[in-house]
Image (tube, grey):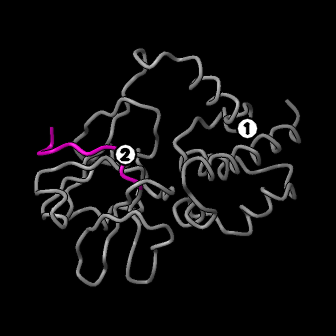
């Protein structure tokens, strides 16, 4: 495969993965240690020969194969996989479970890293970038300590309940509002599933 073709795949995959994983160029830069200029140049097609160390940092960030990110079309692959795999035959996703008190300090870590240092639960469904949040405090009459919330980290879709963190009260809350992120409020992500008393 020609370099130009590989760099085109890389560019398209970064765009698709940022969008589909609920990430931003900024979160990619912050977590991978790459500069915004590097990412911008790749996305604008200004670099044909992307350094392999850069490719590896990007693929690690998204938790995808280093080889595949330059050679296959992820959007096409994921559409095919989600349309032909029968629900009953899906592998469950391993979801790292973080205690509420450890959540914020670990929020910027990658799922793969979290999965190696925290207990795991499993989620059956088509989602990614999931974390489990084990509540240690009640959330406004909705959830009790011991409840487990499965959250799509960083995602904020309309219509879904969102788990947010109030930096002033240092407490979690649930909201349906879009665009709630402020200097005071940090969006953890969309709540995908609730399990009462950790069940």
**Residue at position x 66%, y 68% in the image:** 35
Instruction: Give coordinates of residue 135: x percent, y percent.
Output: 17, 57
Q: Is 198 contained in the magenta span?
A: yes
| Residue count near mark 2 (Cα–Cα under 10 Å), binned few <14, some 14–19, many ≥20 | some
Of the numbered discs 2 and 1, the one sitting upstream in the chain is: 1
Which of the pair 102/165 is nearer the observer?
165
Look at the picture and state if 14 lies above or below 188.
above
Count of all numbered marks drawn on residues in the image: 2
Quadrant housing the N terminus: top right
Q: Quadrant of the C terminus?
A: top left
What residue is at 15 percent from the left and 45 percent from the top?
A: 196
Q: Residue at x 83, y 43 (%)?
A: 8
Q: Residue at x 42, y 15 (%)?
A: 89
Question: What segment carries the magenta color?
Answer: 190-199
Residue under label 1, please give it: 70
How much space separates mark 2 and mark 1, taking CA atoms?
31 Å
**Disc 2 vs disc 1: which is toward the camera?**
2
Task: From the viewer's perspective, tell me whether residue 12 is left or right of residue 24.
Answer: right
Question: Residue 173 sits in which quadrant?
Answer: bottom left
**SS label for mark 1:** helix
Helix, strand or loop at mark 2? strand
* x and y, in percent, of residue 9 in the image: 78, 40
Query: Where 81 sits versus 5, above or below?
Result: above
* Closer-to-camera residue (167/112): 167
Relative image position of residue 127 (x, y in whole percent): 46, 38
Magenta span: predominant SS is strand
- Can you identify the residue that label 2 sits on? 192
**Viewer-proximal residue among 11 and 86:** 86
């Amino acid at each position: 495969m020609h370099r130009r073709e590989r760099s085109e795949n890389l560019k398209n995959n970064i765009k698709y993965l940022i969008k589909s994983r609920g990430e931003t160029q900024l979160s990619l830069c912050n977590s991978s240690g790459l500069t915004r200029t590097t990412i911008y140049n790749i996305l604008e097609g200004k670099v044909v020969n992307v350094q392999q160390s850069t490719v590896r940092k990007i693929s690690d960030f998204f938790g995808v194969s280093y080889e595949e990110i330059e050679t296959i079309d992820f959007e096409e692959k994921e559409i095919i996989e989600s349309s032909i795999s029968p629900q009953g035959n899906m592998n469950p996703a391993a979801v790292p479970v973080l205690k509420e008190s450890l959540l914020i300090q670990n929020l910027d870590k990658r799922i793969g890293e979290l999965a190696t240092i925290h207990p795991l639960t499993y989620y059956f469904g088509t989602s990614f970038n999931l974390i489990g949040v084990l509540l240690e405090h009640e959330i406004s009459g909705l959830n009790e300590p011991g409840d487990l919330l499965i959250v799509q980290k960083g995602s904020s879709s309309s219509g879904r309940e969102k788990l947010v963190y109030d930096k002033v009260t240092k407490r979690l809350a649930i909201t349906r509002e879009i665009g709630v992120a402020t200097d005071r409020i940090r969006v953890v992500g969309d709540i995908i599933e609730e399990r009462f008393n950790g069940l």
